[in-house]
Amino acid sequence: MSSGDRKLAESYWRRSWGYESDNFYRKEFVVNAYMAGMRKQRAINRRNEDDKMVAAMSPEGVVRAYSGELVNVLHPMRGTIKMSDIAWSLGRTLRYNGHIKQDYTVAHHCLIMSYYVDEKFAMEALLHDAAEAYMGDILDPIKRLYPQIAKDEAKLTGEIMRIFAEDLTSHCVDRVGVYTRSKEVAEADRALFEHECLALGNRPGVYNGAMQVAWQKAIAGSNELWAAAQYPFLHRFHELRGTEATVAELNELAEVAWFSEQTPVLDDLDDDQTASIEAAAGELW
């Protein structure tokens, strides 16, 4: 143990006993016991980190993100989770498993909620379904059949919030990193569900004027391209953080976004068609 550990242990002795005891042996016993406890705790911490590393390398629960990163949904490592991956996946994941009459994505759902709630809860609303980028949009009736799924999703969501916006989501993520929806976001989610039912035309719903305003903001940010929701999602995240998207993030999204969406087979296009698509992609930025 270092001299710093010794000083820390002696400080503990003074706080515990309130004076410098003349009993040398009692003091040494307490100080050495405290230092032994420190050694034991450090060993436990190292073992826990080793366990996390092994778990992260295990094939069970590991998904390969669009960027190529391997993410263990049960034991996520910070360096493997990227906001560009989350934006990309949510912008291509249809709500309700695609059982809707429009191409309406999870990214749109989160964007609309972030505009609907009070600014204090906007980041939570934007990221409340972030875990679905790795676990998929599992319908609530299925989650009720398998409660562990909801627990794992809450843990992954909490970890994502702690990584990217801990200061803006501390009200809904507990000390062990598990996410619990705030009352405001839960109510907004229910209201949006009712509005989605009406707007998407697949079941009876309830019109909400304030929600429609938020809906229009989200669509306007999508450049009228439903499939391009990943861009305004990333922009909204940085807007709430007070930062700007990095060149690397934009490049990761731009790398295949336009050509995978608009031109599945570029070889089938003539030069004029290819040039027009490239020009349109340039206008997006």
Image (cartoon, rainbow, N blue to C red):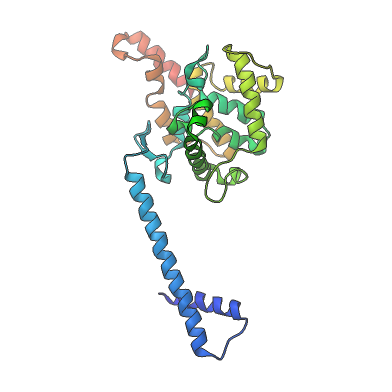
116 or 265: which is nearer to us? 116
Q: In screen coordinates, is 44 left or right of 192?
A: left
| Depicted 205 relative to depicted 156: above or below | above
Whether residue 52 appears in this view of the structure is yes
Residue at (64% x, 38% y) in the render: 182
State which quadrant residue 198 falls in.
top right
6 or 213: which is nearer to us? 6
- Tell me residue 257's x, y (percent): 41, 23
Residue at (52% x, 45% y) in the render: 162
Whether residue 216 appears in this view of the structure is no
235 or 163: which is nearer to us? 163
| Depicted 207 relative to depicted 252: above or below | above
Q: Which residue lies furthest to the bottom in this view?
A: 22
Q: How many marks?
A: 0
267 or 138: which is nearer to us? 138
Residue at (52% x, 26% y) in the render: 141
| Depicted 195 relative to depicted 69: above or below | above
- Tell me residue 164's x, y (percent): 51, 42
Quadrant in the picture for the N terminus: bottom left
Residue at (37% x, 9% y) in the render: 273
Q: Which residue lies furthest to the right in this view?
A: 209
- Tell me residue 100's x, y (percent): 52, 14
- Tell me residue 176's x, y (percent): 52, 50
Q: Which residue lies furthest to the left in this view?
A: 267
